[in-house]
Image: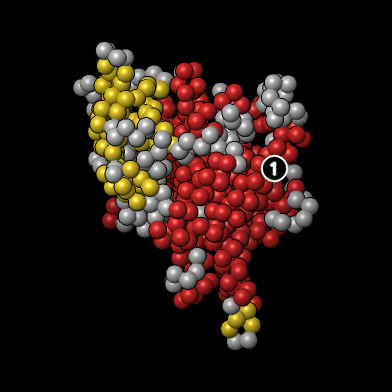
Amino acid sequence: MKKIVALKERNFAEKDKYDYASRDFEDAIDNYNKVLEIIGEIAGDVIAPNAESVDHDGPQVENSRVIYARGTQENHDALTQAGVYGITLPRQYGGLNFPMVAYVMSGEMVSRADAGFANIWGLQDCAETISEFASDEIKAQYLPRVCEGATCSMDLTEPDAGSDLQAVQLKATYSEKDGTWYLNGVKRFITNGDAQIKLVLARSEEGTSDGRGLSYFVADNKHDHTVLVRRIENKLGIKGSPTCELVFNNTPAQLVGTRRLGLIKYVMSLMNGARLGIGAQSVGLSAAAYNEALSYARDRRQFGKAIIEFPAVYEMVSIIKAKLDASRALLYETTRFVDVYKAYESIENAYDSIQVHGGSGFMKDYACERLFRDARIMTIYEGTSQLQVVAAIRHVTTGNYLKMIRDYDAQPIKPEFSSFRKRLQIMTNLYANAVARVIEAKSQEYLDFQARRLVEMAGHIVMSYLLIIDASRDTDDLFRKSAEIYLNYGEVEVRRHAAFIKTFDVENVDIYKVV
C-alpha cells in the first residue's frame, strides 16, 4: 500500500493545494479508513434495512423514465449527501483521489448490504473511463457531476449483441452542420439504463461489421426524451437495479477518445474495471451469506442444542468462511495489481447458506433466499464465467500463473505454516504437470475442454498461498483457521482435476461426446 499511495498521490504533490489532500502515507490510510467507516455506516444503517423492500417493490417505468424504488432512492441520497461518490476521481473535479483498493472495499460493504444497489454504486466506474480517455472539455463537463452523485451506465449490449460486442449495430452519425454525433438504435440488458450519464458503444463507421467500426460515446441523458426506456426486465435477482431496454432517437453524444477504438481499447478498459466491481459484489454477497448462515446456525436449536454444534453444519459454515476469506484475499491482491498498473500508465456460498437454514432457507422469511437469487447473475454479466476462462487460459499456457505461484512460495511465512507450504508445493507440481500434459497434446479443442480445470487449479493454489501469507502477517489469528480449511478444500479440488487430466485419453475419446 505504501507504493500504491505514493503513486496515486504523486508523492503528495497536492497537499498544499487541497486542504483534504493526504500529507503522507499515514494520513492517506487514515483518510481511507474514515471514508470507509462512513460508507460502512450508511451500508449498515440505510442500505441493508432497505434491501427487502427494494427487492419487493423494485423500480418502475413511468412516461418512458425509470423511477427507483423508495429504498433505492434513499440509499443513493444518503451516499450523495455524504460526498463519497467519485471516490477514485482526481481532486480537481471534486473527487477523493482514492486508489482502487479503497473503492473495492467500499463496493464489498455496499454489496454486503444489498447486492442489487451495488450495481448503481459501482457504475461510477464509468467515470474512470472518462477520466482516462476523454478530452479535457468532456472531463470538466461530466466528472464533477459524478462526484455530486450523477448516476452512470455503460450501454453496450443489444438484442442481437450480447457477449459478442463486435455485432453492435446502434448507429452513430456525425453532423457536419452542428459538429455533433447522434445515436440511433436499441440497447438491451442495460444496468441502471436510465442513468444521467451514459457511455454508449456505437457503430460510427459506415460499411463495417466488426469491432473496428465501433467507437465510444458519452451522452447526457437530460430527460429530453431522446433516450426512451421501453421496459425494465423482470429478473430473478438484483431487482432493485433497473435493467432496461432502451431506444435512442437522435440522441446527441460526444466522442470519447479516438474513432474505431471503442471496443478494442475503451470498452475493454471499462470491462476490466467493472470486473473488479463484480468481484467486490460477489465477496460482499458471500459475506452476507456467511453472516446469515452463522447467525441462523447459532440460533436454531434441534435435539436440545444449536445446530452449529452438529459437525456437518459446523463444517459447512467453516467452509463458507474459508471461501469468503480466500476470495477476498484474491480480490484485494488483484486490485493492488490494478492500482499499480493504472498508476504507471461468490455464488456457492449463497447456495450453502440456504442449506444451513434447511427448509426455512427456501422461505421468504429469511434473507438468504434473496442472496441466492441475487448471486445467480454474477457468473453471467461482465462476461460469463466461460468467457472469463477463455481470457484466463492464456496465462496458464504462457506460464504466468505458475511464475506468480512460485513468487508466492518464495515469500516468508511463519514457521508453523511450513507443512502448509510443502502441501502447496505438491499441489503446484500437480498443476504444472497437468498444464504440460494438456499443452503437449497440441490440440486447441482439448485445451478449451480442460481450460476450466486448469484455471480452477491455479485459483485454488493462489488463494491458499494468499491466505497463508495473510495469516503470517496477522497478529490476531483472523486468517489461520480459514487458511487451514481452504487449503484442505483446495487440495482436494486440485487433486481431483489433476487426476481427471492425467487419466483422460485425449487420443481415443471424442471430447464432444463426453459432454
Residue that appears at 61% across and 65% down: 318
Q: Position of residue 24 (x, y in %)?
A: 76, 29
Task: Say how the picture is coloured.
Answer: secondary structure
Q: Position of residue 469 (x, y in %)?
A: 70, 47
Say if residue 498 shows up in the picture: no
**Between residues 461 and 56, which one lies in front from this camera angle?**
56
Which residue is farthest bottom?
303
- Few, some or many residues within 10 Å of mark 1 (<14, 14–19, 20+): few
Q: Position of residue 18 (x, y in %)?
A: 68, 24
**Between residues 67 and 249, which one lies in front from this camera angle?**
67
For the C terminus, the quadrant is bottom left
507 to the left or right of 420: left
Could you say which quadrant of the image residue 258 lies in? top left
Secondary structure beneath dot 1 equals helix
Callout 1, which amino acid? Answer: Lys
Residue that appears at 41% across and 35% down: 196
Say if residue 201 shows up in the picture: yes
122 to the left or right of 28: left
- Is residue 442 placed above or below 426 in the rendered structure? above
- Is residue 158 placed above or below 251 in the rendered structure? below
**Between residues 63 and 407, which one lies in front from this camera angle?**
63
Q: Position of residue 304 (x, y in %)?
A: 63, 86
Q: Dot 1 corresponds to which residue?
A: 34
Which residue is farthest left?
207
